[in-house]
Amino acid sequence: MRLLPLAVLAPLLVACAHGARPRVPPLVSPADRALDSTLRDAVDRAGIVGASTAVVVDGRIIWMRSYGLADRERAEPLTPKTVMSLASVAKTTVGVTMLRLVHRRRLDLDADVNDYLPFRIVNPHRPTARIMLRHLATHTSSITDRRDFYAALYRPPTAPRASLDALLRSYLVADGADYRPENFLPVPPGASRDYSNLGAALAAYVVERVVGEPFDAHTARVIFTPLGLRSATWAPPSDERTGESRLYDQDSAGTHRVAPYALASYPDGGLRMSVEDLARYFAMLLGHGAVGGVRIVDSAAVAEMRRFQWTAARKPADVDLADANSGLFWRTKFGGRRVGHGGNDVGVAAEMLTDAAGRVGIVLVSNTSLHGAANRQFLRMIEALTAYGNSVAANSGGAAP
């Protein structure tokens, strides 16, 4: 399979290596055109309003294209620079900021989380058991998202946002207005995996407490600004601002527009940025904490974030290691064949994936939440992007991951 000629590929790779923002390369090879055709066909078959894609190989962005519309009603095209909602991909920033502090010995993954809080959290079913940061980052803390409470966290973008302190006190502290024993599983921390958005928000609040600044301001200072991620924002979407994608959902009646919304527990799913910036952020993680000469986090901290935490002798009882393992806000997916983080919410489907070797990474973000056959087309896009990246890796030296 012939890929981009060196004359086209080399300037792109050099620009990325020096931190420059890559231009979208032309479709000059059969491999490029085949990938483009597959992605266009999948978007059409799925009824996706818009999807943006990127491929990273050895820390360099070698593919970046968008399909469809950012705003169907206004016929506004989607581009790699369009700001898109990322849903739970946001949780990786909790992992990065948390592990920066662990590396600086300001946090201990295995300390009682209460050591860092101005209030006390106790699982009423297991009052002597400690909840640790490692539990929060692997979704084994025994904190569970009570459906009615979490649904109420989705609010109009203009609604005032309560502090993480107030939100978590209300839900997790015994005298809180929203406290219930069923906010916790009847098992000790570490015994069962139960995906907890509020557990991730609690980890972000611990970071906030230790650094002495709000989590959104902290991520901007230590991740987004140094990397030049100008589009990255925790602000909720709007129907008025240009350069932002609108949100769409599918049901039996077709695809319809979703009103913009804010998330009170924003660190667990409120991040938005362009795919151009997300690909650079992912290149940093795949580059062991650095990209384009800019280091965000120590390589040992990234290694711990990506390291599988569970073994056959030490894992939650309900986890099958043949199917799933976990890093810290980082996990295996698709039967263990991929690793990274995804995000799904109303109007959002996103994946940021690599494999254990980490040479090839793919980014795929849709402004349309998917169901059934449409979701199968989304998976088809993931496979096509991964195959393209593996081919580039194999042709650029060394075995493809």
Image (tube, helix red, strand yellow):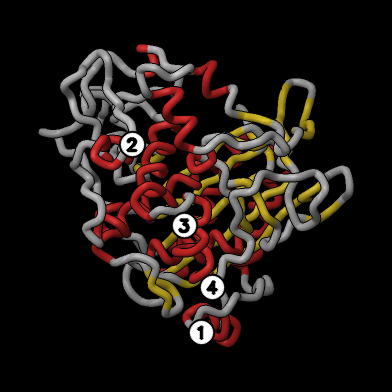
Q: Nearer the viewer, mark 2 or mark 1?
A: 2
Q: Which residue is mark 2?
A: 118
Q: Nearer the viewer, mark 4 or mark 3?
A: 3
C-alpha gap between disc 4 and disc 1: 20 Å
Numbered disc 1: secondary structure: helix
Residue ID at (66%, 71%): 24
C-alpha gap between disc 4 and disc 2: 59 Å
Q: Which residue is mark 3?
A: 218
Residue ID at (32%, 36%): 136
Q: Which residue is mark 4?
A: 2
C-alpha gap between disc 3 and disc 1: 30 Å
Residue nearest the observer in this picture, 93 or 56: 93
Q: Which residue is mark 1?
A: 14
Q: Of the residues under marks 3 and 1, which one precedes in the sequence?
A: 1
Numbered disc 3: secondary structure: helix
Residue 399 makes an appearance in the image: yes
- In this rendering, is residue 246 above or below 280? above
C-alpha gap between disc 4 and disc 3: 44 Å
C-alpha gap between disc 2 and disc 1: 48 Å
Numbered disc 2: secondary structure: loop
Q: Quadrant of residue 169?
A: top left
Q: Amino acid at mark 4?
A: Arg
Q: Of the residues under marks 3 and 2, which one precedes in the sequence?
A: 2
